[in-house]
Amino acid sequence: MQILVAGGAGYIGSHTCTALLEAGHRVIAADNLCNSKAETIIKVEHIAGKDMVFYEIDVTDTASVDTVFANHEIDGVIHFAGFKAVGESVEKPLDYYYNNIVSTMVLSRACMKYGVGKFVFSSSATVYGENQVPFVETMDLLPTTNPYGETKAVSERILTDAARANPGFKVSLLRYFNPVGAHESGLIGESPNGIPNNLMPFITQVVKGKLDRLQIFGNDYPTIDGTGVRDYIHVMDLAEGHVSALDHLTEGVHIYNLGTGQGTSVLQLVRAFEEAIGVEVPFEIVTRRPGDIAECYADVSKAQEELGWTARRDIIAMCRDAWRFENSYSD
């Protein structure tokens, strides 16, 4: 199949492009490079040993997206082109609502116009709000604690309604948890602009000496050690989950959690990194971030049963691969 990957130069998008190419699919990537770099596309091609097509466009722009669909016979879309920082979404809600929801609207309407029947959406565990863990796909969605989560929930509803109104439009909503790590080659990984919002690149940049110390946001949560608990999943496991979802996509709307099914606290991840790399990670406890919840981890049985997919890489592998990328990456 020929797949359009919106946000294909980004962290999860680039790893998914790699997995798609290695699985034999042809890939068209679209990205406005607001939080990514064009050279990532070249690195993906090097890893996979295959070429891909790249468009530097913003997928909220209807005319630009229309050009891509008109120029290519597209079989499916994977949509990663969303802003993704919980804290930033609280500070800039209008930016998040516009970018994340309009991009979903533009891409899905283009699918209708050009008869593209497969759509895989990058959703998030934040849509569960403060439901009781482990999160299960059948749960009623609670109001989320941040605009980022709301944009994902609204996009899910848009795509669900579109699929109901257009029976040939097949949708997979992937609610995934906390991606970390990097491709084992060290060529691609998470390289955010400025101070990282996510934990793993924050840790690696501290150890590399780019930042003084890790900030841990709160140690008074009702968890094993007071720090937030998350379901960390290796980014390549996550990428392979997208390929499985695409390959198994059938009529209707399908929802899957992509995680490991295990909760790990922030401090536990820090200690795992220290064990994996043999270094000490200096940190300080600061106040909680707005929008964060205490615990978030998945029930992953549905993805295992229906997609034949399971996360294979452990926390130590996540830490080692992230550190390998940090050491090979140059600003």
Image (cartoon, rainbow, N blue to C red):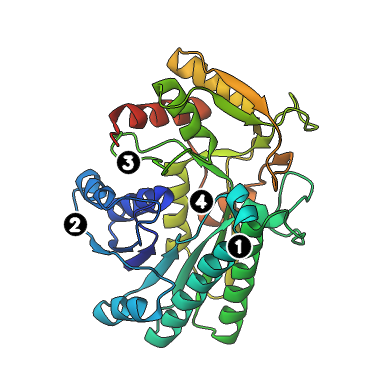
Is there a contact, CB below 8 Å, between mark 4 and mark 3? no
Q: Which residue is mark 1?
A: 152
Instruction: Give the mark nearest the N terminus, 1 or 2.
Output: 2
Q: Nearer the viewer, residue 147 or 195?
A: 195
Q: Is residue 279 above or below residue 221?
A: above
Q: Is residue 313 visible?
A: no
Q: Which mark is residue 51?
A: 2
Instruction: Please state which of the two labelled residues, at mark 1 or mark 4, is closer to the viewer.
Output: 1
Label 4: how many residues lie within 10 Å, few (<14), some (14-19) or many (20+)? few
Identify the residue at image location x=19%, y=53%.
50
Q: Which residue is mark 3?
A: 188
Q: Amino acid at mark 3?
A: Ile
Q: Position of residue 53 (x, y in %)?
A: 23, 64
Q: Nearer the viewer, residue 292 or 80?
A: 292
Identify the residue at image location x=46%, y=77%.
106
Q: Position of residue 76 (x, y in %)?
A: 39, 71
In this image, 153 relative to 69: left or right?
Answer: right
Q: Amino acid at mark 2?
A: Asp
Q: Position of residue 235 (x, y in %)?
A: 45, 42
Q: Amino acid at mark 4?
A: Gly
User: Between marks 3 and 2, how big is the CA–CA gap?
Assistant: 16 Å
Q: Amino acid at mark 1?
A: Lys
Q: Secondary structure at mark 1?
A: helix
Q: Which mark is residue 308?
A: 4
Instruction: Please state which of the two labelled residues, at mark 1 or mark 2, is closer to the viewer.
Output: 1
Q: Position of residue 256 (x, y in %)?
A: 59, 57
Instruction: Give the mark nearest the N terminus, 1 or 4.
Output: 1
User: Between marks 1 and 3, how big is the CA–CA gap?
Assistant: 26 Å
